[in-house]
Amino acid sequence: MALLISIQTFDPESYGAEPFDIGVYGGQDDRLAGSLITAIEHDKSYSVQNDWPFEPSATVTHTLAKHGVRKNVVGAMVAINNRLVWDTVRQERMARYLAAVLRSVIEGGISARPGDPPEQVLASELL
């Protein structure tokens, strides 16, 4: 199964005193987004929120719609708090973490139907 992951960052100061670390968006088919959120929540290394800090109606999911939905590819957008990727060390740490989360989701299996939880593998075990 092909997957599409779109990644961007956000400025935490624009979204309140206690912003989440990672926001995940899935659009119409939220299987991948739901699996990513479940994996991140299970791992507990970072706080995660669905459809945050932006609303999907703000056209932030353009890449998913154009290159995913139109081509029947399951996708998700991941928004990372800027403070987590401020320098090279943090960027590498986040890249390794997201790679491990994606690997855990792929190894656990993306739900066949929205709402069905996949098996979970701790991302930290895959680093």
Image (cartoon, rainbow, N blue to C red):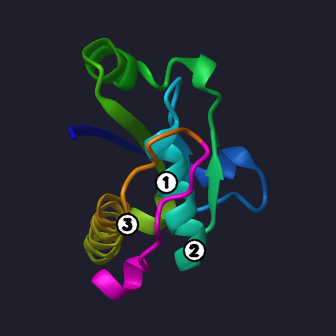
Residue 121 lies, with reference to residue 20, above or below; the image says below
**Which badge, 3 or 2, comes first in the chain's sequence?**
2
In the picture provided, is 6 more to the left or to the right than 71? right
**Gap between marks 1 and 2 measured at Cα:** 10 Å
In the rendered view, does 31 fall on the left or right side of 69?
right
In the rendered image, is residue 45 in sight?
A: no
Q: Which mark is first along the chain, 2 or 1?
A: 1
Asked if residue 36 shows in the view, the reply is yes
Q: Position of residue 107 (x, y in %)?
A: 29, 65
Residue 50 in picture, x, y percent from top left: 64, 45
Residue 122 belongs to magenta span: yes
Q: Report whether 19 appears left or right of 39.
A: right
Residue 45 in percent (x, y) is at 53, 79
Local SS, label 3: helix
Circle 1: residue type:
Ser
Residue corresponding to mark 1: 35
Residue neighbourhood size for the residue with mark 2, other residues' Cα within 10 Å, grouped as few (<14), some (14–19), many (≥20): some
State the CA–CA distance, disc 3 to disc 2. 10 Å
Place of residue 51 in the rendered image (x, y in percent of width and height, measured from the top left): 63, 38
Quarter holding residue 32: top left
Q: Quadrant location of residue 123? A: bottom left
Name the residue located 56 percent from the left edge and 57 percent from the top edge.
117
Tell me which segment is drawn in magenta: 115-127
Q: Which residue is mark 2?
A: 42
Nearer the N terminus, badge 3 or badge 1?
A: 1
Please tell me which residue lies in front, 70 or 54. Answer: 70
Name the secondary structure under disc 2: helix
- Name the residue carrying label 3: 101
Q: State yes or no: discs 1 and 2 in contact (Cβ < 8 Å).
A: no
Q: Label 2 is placed on what type of residue? A: His
User: Mark 1: few, some, or many residues within 10 Å (few <14, many ≥20)?
Assistant: many
Q: Taken as a whole, is the magenta stretch helix, strand or loop?
A: loop
